[in-house]
Amino acid sequence: MSLICELSDLQRLYHKRVPKMFQGYAESGSWQQQTLGLNQSDFQQILFRQRVARDLEPRSLATKLVGQDAKMPLALAPVGLLGMQHADGEILAAQAAEEFGVPFTLSTMSICSIEAVAAKTSKPFWFQLYVQKDREFTKKLIERAKAAGCSALVVTLDLQMIGRRHADHRNGMTAPPKLTIPNLIDIARRPRWAFNMLQTSHRQFGNIQGCATGVDDMNDLMKWTASSFDTKLSWEDIRYFREIWQGPLIIKGIMEIADAQECVKLGADAIVVSNHGGRQLDGARSSISVLPEIVAAVGDQVDVWLDGGIRSGQDIIRAKALGAKGVMVGRPLVYGLGAMGKAGVSKMLELFHQEAELTMAFIGHRDIHQITRDDIVFQHESFQGVR
């Protein structure tokens, strides 16, 4: 196996080992994918100030995320269908995160259920909630998360309806995959993935199958998934969930100051500046360009995190310099998991930690909390993040 030196090495291995329909699901954005591209390219507008002759021992990236100790200011983001990228994917990713010392977030649309992940881990993980039209089912999801000992609830607000993702439509994306001739040929070229999937019983949406009303088989489930998200979701609904969930509440999908202020009013512990990885509204601004204005507006009242476009430990430092208390990463998690399973997730976390620590040292700091706006400059004055 080739040497893994950076995320792109894991990405190349991921492309060799995972069926194309699941690659498309993880990597694509919506419509013309403009926002997907901006999420990454806007990071490149942020340059570092290099400093020398500083005492750089000892160095630490350690911090707290909603009161939980973390080895670095990073949490694994909720990713739907993670168990289709690699057999038992949610379990393996949660185990890797636990061993490394960062939080793992389980998606509502996971393949392995809340209970399955809890049975295979020893420390609490976070649960991400999509609000369903069926409020009783939504409440039951929260109760199941409580019973499993989940330590934080991550409510995602930017998926009241699903964005137009052309790759999923072209690939006929389902879980498990439909056994069409093109899919069978593609899977046959990836025997490692197929063998692992045959060894597990987790091949459907574990949090939904057998739990949601009217879902009897996979065809019903796919129809239910497409129509279940609540287009009438309001801040009053979120206030209700705040009342029944007593633990830390994280609200994900915030891109405007007014929405961030609403999160503060209802008592959120953290908000995540995110455009859903460019998978919802195409033509929206990048997450990193929006971050500074959100931090300026509410950063002294609630922890502000960033999601979207982070592809290295250096990007963690860039986000930190613009005021983020932490970041969430999704696609890097997918690349590591699909490439090498649990070991790949661990490797991705190690790479990000090394890159962030080295960058922090080169700009003259030995503690992550010392990083400020003074540590960066902008390549172009037109970059919206300087506002």
Image: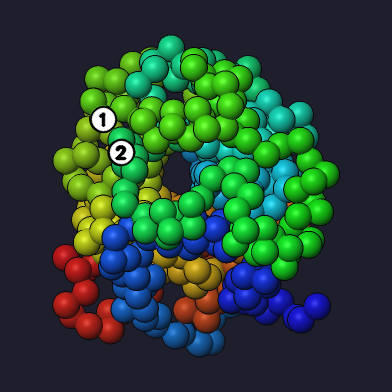
- Measured in 3D between alpha carbons, the distance from the residue under mark 2 to the one under mark 1, in whole angstroms, is 6 Å
- Residue situated in front as seen by the camera: 92 or 198: 198
* Badge number at residue 231: 1
Left or right, 138 with respect to 267, comes to right
Label 2, secondary structure: give it: loop
Residue 262 placement (x, y as % from top left): 22, 33
Q: Pointer 2 and pointer 1: residues touching (CB < 8 Å)? A: yes
Image-quadrant location for residue 381: bottom left
* Residue at x-position 33% and y-position 16%: 240
* Residue at x-position 62% and y-position 70%: 15
- Residue situated in front as seen by the camera: 107 or 247: 107
Q: Amino acid at mark 2?
A: Met
Q: Amino acid at mark 1?
A: Thr
The answer, for residue 57, to whether it is visible in the render is no
Label 1, secondary structure: give it: loop
Which quadrant of the rendered structure holds the C terminus? bottom left
Give the answer, above or below, for where 77 lies relative to 186.
above
Residue 106 placement (x, y as % from top left): 57, 38
Task: Indicate the colouring scheme.
Answer: rainbow
Which quadrant of the rendered structure holds the N terminus? bottom right
Farthest-out residue, front: 181
Image-quadrant location for residue 189: bottom right
- Residue situated in front as seen by the camera: 317 or 109: 109
Residue 26 placement (x, y as % from top left): 51, 57
* Badge number at residue 178: none
* Badge number at residue 161: 2
Left or right, 42 with respect to 320, comes to left
* Residue at x-position 28% and y-position 84%: 379
Residue 170 placement (x, y as % from top left): 43, 59
Crowding near the residue tagged with mark 2, few <14, some 14–19, many ≥20 C-alpha atoms within 10 Å: few
Crowding near the residue tagged with mark 1, few <14, some 14–19, many ≥20 C-alpha atoms within 10 Å: few
Give the answer, above or below, for where 141 lies relative to 181.
above
